[in-house]
Structure formats: structure tokens, C-alpha cells
Amino acid sequence: MPVDFTFGAFKTTVHVSRELPRIEGIAADSGTAAGFFRPLIICDEHTVPITDAVCGAAFPRCVLKSGESNKGWLAVETILRAAREAGLGRDGVFVGVGGGVIGDLAAFAASIYMRGCGLALVSTTLLGMVDAGVGGKTGFDLFGVKNLAGTFYPARHVYMPLESLSALPLPEWKSGFAELIKTAVLAGDDFLDELQALAAAFPAGAFVSGFGRNSGFPPDFASRLLEGDAGRLRRCISRAVEFKGCVVEADPRETGQTRMLLNLGHTFAHALESTAGLGTISHGEAVAWGLVRACELGLALGITPRARAEKIKNLVMRYGYETAAPHSLAGDTETFIKALNADKKKKAGNLTFIVPDEKNARMFTAASGADMDTIKQTARGALSF
Amino acid sequence: MPVDFTFGAFKTTVHVSRELPRIEGIAADSGTAAGFFRPLIICDEHTVPITDAVCGAAFPRCVLKSGESNKGWLAVETILRAAREAGLGRDGVFVGVGGGVIGDLAAFAASIYMRGCGLALVSTTLLGMVDAGVGGKTGFDLFGVKNLAGTFYPARHVYMPLESLSALPLPEWKSGFAELIKTAVLAGDDFLDELQALAAAFPAGAFVSGFGRNSGFPPDFASRLLEGDAGRLRRCISRAVEFKGCVVEADPRETGQTRMLLNLGHTFAHALESTAGLGTISHGEAVAWGLVRACELGLALGITPRARAEKIKNLVMRYGYETAAPHSLAGDTETFIKALNADKKKKAGNLTFIVPDEKNARMFTAASGADMDTIKQTARGALSF
């Protein structure tokens, strides 16, 4: 069943399904009069086969290079040029087919093309489904800072075909799981328990050696993703979509205190991605590492109970993530703190962090020198538990 | 008295005044807690003296090259880099000091910096006051197309210090008067009459030789702008602000039929600016020329009464604009039609035009080959009256 959300002036309908959507359905959903549907298909090297299955070769298509390191203005300009060359007007529809990077780029380009054209997204990765695809944040990297430039521009329709997950390589899975764990911390312990059970449904060693094509992925796993034990994954995706959608409905442009909660783990993660060099470490690996730092910070501040911090850290480790600090890609402490200080979400010049509390999570603003010392200790591993 | 408008989720307060605003007042208006006002001042070569008067040298400043030909991504990136280097967070405030180009660029950059930071504009030109400064359209030129990329992002506060007009060179005056005439056509004949009277208040020959500094501008004119006969100008500016603000309140993102009306003269104007080469002809010269084309089109279609078309054309000529078609910078008819066809505001693939009607103006969609023939005739001067 499609789920509808209202994000300020925008409406988004999310379609979680087994099969890929067909372009005829996307056209019908777009509400364009018959014969006037003018799409630009945006995908990357990896999602060309999925794109072929969605719409054949009948529509103008813009194929971008994959990966975070190509998420710059050049990619945005490439999309805008393709739209211009295809003669799209403001009533054209950008259709992004891919993961978080393609979603962010296609949505940003749609938000500025002629001051905003139509937008639909086909999320083909776990990250796209549980996080990036819903909520309207768009953006690209600039001056080495992740998503320094961006807009709020929710897609009218987001398609989440679970089928597309079966070929996903390990790093993409891990990007998604980290956001799922983050969501579960925010939503409460029974979601954490569900993720613990989900981990058990995956083949032994999957989180180390992978479960996608070319990585020892068992042949029946695609169907198990959707039914039986692994049907849990579908439930977890739907639950994450519902949770994020409701948070964003409450605070679409992050002007209040609600949407910021989704930033759990991300202040540390963005700084790590930045010091490592954008694209060097997957967003999920960074978020997972950041989640554990947030637990350490919360413990030191007396906000996170030790049992909860341990539950979260154990789950992060169960999914095969590196959790130790200092991180080998974080540079020295001063470099890392400098990267932290470039964070977008400062309040009156002070860094803010989301830290787990008894049941969910809450915001903490680092307003004093002592706070910053605690954060430095976290970064260099002095608060490991 | 400041005037408040609500544009969708945004609020804009417009301050028409005699004197320049001071940065202390801008800080207070911004609502930032005392001591936490973090501005980036954005101006161009021409508005440096005004900027000095507004805020001295105490704040980080980004000085752009002047003119439409510098209104590209490079200028946007320059602003974003300055903001990044100044360490601005999302709670920073971009303060644009200048005309339409600076306003569009500063506002676009503000709309994407960390997905949207604070924004105040000081409109120093007539165009900025009567048109570009109010309503939230931002943008920059790309692939030779004016404002191909942009967003809707209304400034929280817009300051319109009439004092800054006294040094305005002739082309800038003419850019503003064209938008004033356009607004008057939309608002009704008594506003047209007021503009007729306003023209009489200017010194003889002013619309040919200029009335700004270094162009025979009478010494008492600055005060006459604000009082006496020329106090009409202040009334006309306030009236245009009110009219435009109300139109945009009714249809902030131009998704309905209302805001499109402001496009009167602009479909032809944008095509002319594009064929001439962006920056070759002032926006106002192009809009004035486009207004007369819109009258011709309306006459041919039986939408514009002949007496009204003549009244509008006479006013355009009274303000010293070139009205003849074909325009020497428009290229041949095929080139011009190609430029028209790149217009952003197509409906289902068809060009749309706003044409004057009995009292105001209405939308016309060129849906048939015969319609396009009429438009071609207009472009090559076959419908001159």
C-alpha cells in the first residue's frame, strides 16, 4: 500500500513493492495529461540495467559516474544540460534511478531547473529506501564538505522496489544498515530488537563477505528478502519509512527541534567522511562509527544509560562495522575537530550532537570548553567502553 | 511603514525609506540573539560605496563583478566559498546590497547554502525595488539561458532606500521603468496615468541623456525624487511593491494562474536577451520591447483593444524605449523563434504569453500553427500599429 506524507507545501507518496516500477506507472502517477509526460531519466553506471528494465531506451537519459566522489556541481550541471538539451520545460519530470547519491543529485537538479520541475525517485539501495529517498533533503558536495549546498525538495513519488536490492554490493548494504540502526535508536528498543533478529536472518559471514551478486550471495536470498524470515527486512524498511516520514512531517525544513534528531551519529560521521576524503569511506560506515561516538559522548555526559549504549554498540558490531576510535581515516585529533567545526548544524556558533537517552535520543549543544574537551576525548578513543 | 507579506511558508517585510539602512538595524530585524549575528555582505563593484555606508568594513564581504554577463554559477560559487571561509553556519545571514542581479545571486546562494541560510536584501536600483526584490524568485544564467537555474526563496527583509537611486545610471533607471510600466498594465489604467504624470516630473531629455551622476542630473533631483512632484516616484514604487506582493501571496510558486501574469512582456524579452547575448541589452529595454510585442499579439488575437494598446505603446515611447520590430539584436526570425521556444513557462509544450486585455492582462497559449505564425509576424514587425 502506498503511504502518503505531507512535508510543508509538498506531498510525497512512497511505494514499497517487490517489483520494479514501469515508466507507464510513473507517468500515470505524475498526473501529467496523456501524451505530455516529458521525463529525464537520471541514473549511474551501476543502475543502467535497472533503468533499462524500468523504461527501456525510449526516453532521454543522463548516466552519471557512480559514487560520493562524483557528487559535485559538475554532476548537477550534467543533469541540467541533459534536461536543457532534451527541451524539458518546468512541467518535465526528473526520474532518478539509484541510491542516495543519485537521489540527492537528481532532486537537487530538479529543485533548481527552471526553479523547480517534477521529480520522481526510484530508490535502488537500502540507504535510499530507509533514509535518503524520503524527506526532501537534496544536495551535493562542495569545497570538500558533504552536502554543503542543497535544498529541501521532496519527490512527489518515491518507488522502493525490493527486487533491486538483490544485486547490491556489501558497502551499499552497510550504508543502509547504519541508517536503519540509527532510526531504530530514535524509534525505541523494540525496533533495535527487530534489527537484532534481522541480522540473524542473514547468511553467516554476510556482513563481512557480502551477500550481493559476485559475493557468495545464496540463490534463494532474493525471495527470502521479501518473505519468510528475511521478510523482516521489508518490515524494517517500511517501519523506517514511516518513522522518518512522520519526523519530517513534524519539522519539514529542520527549523524546529524534531528533524535534527535524524542527525544522530552524523556530526561525527560527516567529519570522518570529510577527513577521510569524500567517497573514501561509505556514508554508512561513517554513520555506524559516529553512532558509537554518540554513545560514548552520551555516557560521558550522563545522558545515555550504560546498558543502552552497550546494546547499540553490540548491534553496530553485529552488522560488521568498525567501531574503534581513533579511526584510521580521521587524521589527528586537531584535524578531526576542525572538520567537526565545519558542521552545518551549529547553533549560535556551537556544535550540536544528538545523543541516545533512556528511550530515544536528544540534542546536546557543546557550549563550553569542557564540552569540547569531552568531544576531543571521544574522537581519540579515550572514552571507549 | 514596513509592509508584511506571506509567501507560502515565508514571510517578507519590505522597508521603503529615504535613508540607507544600517547594519545594526539589519541585525536587529534578523532576530538573531545579540552577539550572534553572522552576516556575509554581498555586493558588486558599483555598490561598494553604498555597502560601506551600510556596514563599514567590519564584516566579511564578497564583491562580485557587475552585470548580467557575470550572473553564472561562478558568481554563486564565489559567494558560497566566501560564506564557507567566513565559517558561516545555517544561522548566518547573507545580506545582498545591489540591484536585480546581486539580489538574484545572493538569494540563490542563500537558498542552497547548507540548504538555506538567512537572507536580507538592500535593493539599490529601481528594478530591485519594483520587481526583483520582492517575491522570492532567485536564479542565475546557465547555457546562455537567463535564470535557467533558480529557486523560490523570499528574503526575510527587503530594504528599499530611495537615496541609493540618486546615483543610478540611465540603463538602470530604464530597467526599472519597464517593470513599472508592466506592473501598471496589470494593475489598471489609473496606474498607467500615474506613470504618465511621473514621466512629466523628470527633467526634459532625462530619458535620453540620463539623470544620474555624470549625466546632467539636476542637483535638486535627489530630494525631488522623494517629495514634491517627483514624490510620485516613491508612491509608484510603493504601489508596485504592494501589487507584486499581493500577486505573489496569491500564488507564491507560480503553480496557479496568477503569478504568471507578472510575465507580461517577458516571453519576448527573454528571447531577445538570449539572442542579443545575455548582458548585451538591459532587462528593462527588453521588457519594454516585449510589452509592445505583447500589445501587437493581443491586437491580432482580438484580446487587446486598440486604444489600450496605443496607450501602453505611447507610455513605453514616452520613457524613451526602442519599440520597433524586428529588433536589431533579435537575429533573424527563425533564430528568435528558437530562443522563444526555450522559454521556461511552456504549458504542455506550448508557449504561453501574457497579453493586455480590456483592463488588465490575461494568459494566451500558442497551441496551433496559426498562433505560431502570428507570433512570427510579431517578431518580424509585420503587426506594427
Image (cartoon, coloured by chain):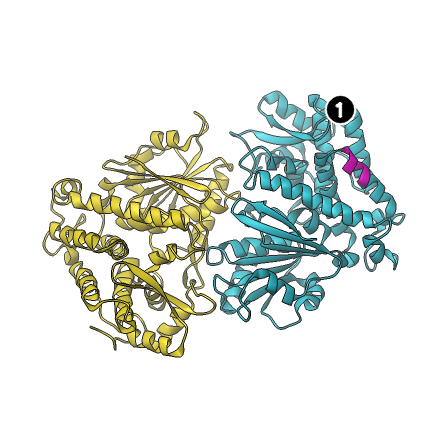
Chain colours: A yellow, B cyan
Question: Split into 4 quadrants, where in the image is the C terminus of chain A?
Answer: bottom left
Residue B193 colored in magenta in the image: yes
Q: Observer-nearest residue: A251 or A111?
A: A251
Which residue lies at the image location 43% right of the left edge and 70% below the top edge? A350
Q: Nearer the viewer, residue A201 or B162?
A: B162
Residue identifier under label 1: B305
Please identify the quadrant where the N terminus of chain A is shown: top left
Q: Residue B258, percent across and down?
A: 60, 34
What's the residue at 33%, 34% (across, down)?
Answer: A55
Most frequent secondary structure within the magenta stretch: helix
B141 to B299, vertically: above or below: below
From which residue to which does the magenta span run? Answer: B189-194
Q: Residues within 10 Å of mark 1 (few under 14, many from 20)?
A: some
- B1 left or right, relative to A67: right
Question: Which residue shows up at 50% across the image and 69% down it?
Answer: B85
Q: Quadrant of residue B340?
A: top right
Residue A78 shown in magenta: no
Q: Can you see residue B290?
A: yes
When the figure is inspected, residue B257 is found, relative to residue B282, above or below; the finding is: above
On the question of residue A332 being in view, the answer is no
Q: Is residue B136 left or right of residue B228?
A: left
Q: Is residue B106 left or right of residue B264?
A: left
Residue B6 % position (x, y): 57, 46
- Circle 1: residue type: Pro
Q: Nearer the viewer, residue B223 or B348?
A: B223
The percent position of residue B99, horizontal first and vertical second, equals: 67, 54
- Looking at this view, name the residue that lies furthest to the right: B204
Give x and y (percent) for residue A115: 52, 44
In the image, residue A71 sits, relative to residue A331, either above or below, namely above
